[in-house]
Image (spheres, rainbow, N blue to C red):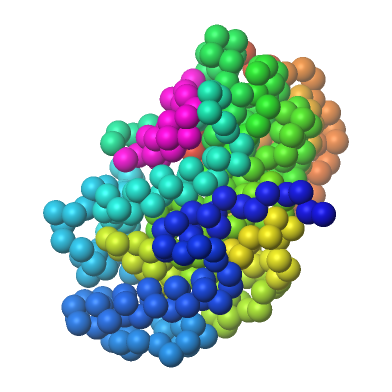
Amino acid sequence: MNDIPVSRLDALIAEQEGLDKVDRDTIRAIQLKKLNRILARENKRGAFYRDLPERLRSLEEISFLPFTTDEDLAQNAGGLLLCSQSKVSRVLSDATSGTTGAAKRVFYTGDDLENTVQLYMAGLGELIFPGSVTMICFPFSGPFGLGELIAEAVSRLGARPLKTGPLLCYGEYAELLEREKPDTFVGMPVQLLGLLRYCGKGSLCRALVSGDACPESVIHGCESILGSRLFPHYGSREMGMAGAICCHAHEGMHLRENHIIAEIIDESGRPLPDGERGELVVTTIGMEAMPLIRYRTGDFTRILPEPCPCGSAALRLDRIERRHTGLSVPELDNIVFEDPAVIDCRYELGKDRLCIFVLAKGGIDKPLMMEKLTAAAAPLKAEIFACYAAPGDHSLYSGKRTLITVV
């Protein structure tokens, strides 16, 4: 008998759609109905998607529609906004001090953000309980920010959110663990591993990771210290900061299909069958402010073809990887974090060399690490600079892990 509980996402979809239960046929019918509703509105409005058909006869016909790209989002924000500005509660932009040209902006209404909180509750509800204490290490950026939305979900579940953020030093994290005794961590995977290796697990026993790639050595390192399986989640700002959640089967991430239609395409843009790996394309039929049609995420994964052992009706995404050319940070991380003494590392890419700066707690096996990194970085010369982590040290990345280009 299967004793794995059904993903809480099924109950959420049923509640949001006014159903007693969900199955594959029901989900597909919901998707087609919502997609056609968006197409009809866009056709009448005459904005960015004005040249698309007013309705489709089947979900399979979606493959005939054109893709939406990051450039489209940057150049046509007003044309992609489907509601009035007065209903917009949050705008996220990728503008930075070094940005040139138009910045990509994504808009959310209050209902969009409420849907995000409800999905967070479904995902977090798999691992936190009333009375527990949850350490949130994502940024807190003001009303309706990522950290704030997660904290709201934690509170609604009857747990206490610790609004830690990602910028404390290791000594401060150690003091917080000792003082507050959180049982659950929510944040990026490498940040979790560094915290566990420097501070020890303390009271922590469960963790939800998201926001960046999670290589095998990082997963193994975290789970071996925690003594429990990680709950990976997937999302992006284009899909409302939340897209897919992990259940107790730990076999992929269930997609919120009443809000997202997922496709996997090959390099030529042709749809791939379930089970084959390619680029993830999403149509965000549940977004009120800015629904996107066939948006190319630049993330690579596959739709797992078999039903989940938990019995959920929702499709599952496999592990996510970002598109990259040349050196891959997850591949490098997989090598460096195999060494159990490594707390964190940073990669700087020069003209002919790759410099790896390592924070460690104890001695590292530098010859073995150098051998593997040299093979991975060829023809670049790899150099490792290691030092012992101190209480005042911080994570070497405050966000997603990237190659830092230096002149």
Percent position (x, y) of residue 360? 70, 22
Q: Taking 51 as reference, is 223 left or right?
A: right
Percent position (x, y) of residue 53? 33, 88
Where are the magenta residues, as a range?
A: 144-168
Q: Quadrant of the N terminus?
A: bottom right
Furthest toward the front, the residue is 20
Q: Between 190 and 164, which is closer to the camera in this rendering?
A: 164
Residue 286 image-quadrant placement: bottom left
Q: Taking 332 as reference, is 74 left or right?
A: left
Could one spot residue 208 in this view of the protein? yes
Percent position (x, y) of residue 38? 31, 75
Rendered view: 402 above or below 281: above
Residue at figure coordinates x 49%, y 54% from the top left:
12
Does 379 lie within the magenta span? no
Percent position (x, y) of residue 70? 39, 64
Residue 42 image-quadrant placement: bottom left
Q: Between 255 and 332, which is closer to the camera in this rendering?
A: 255
Rendered view: 276 above or below 213: below
Does 152 lie within the magenta span? yes
Could one spot residue 296 in this view of the protein? no
Q: Between 144 and 130, which is closer to the camera in this rendering?
A: 130
Q: Taking 24 as reference, is 107 left or right?
A: left
Residue at figure coordinates x 27%, y 60% from the top left:
289
Residue 305 image-quadrant placement: bottom right
Residue at figure coordinates x 76%, y 49% from the top left:
3
Rendered view: 347 above or below 131: below
Residue at figure coordinates x 55%, y 9% from the top left:
179
Total number of numbered discs in the rendering: 0
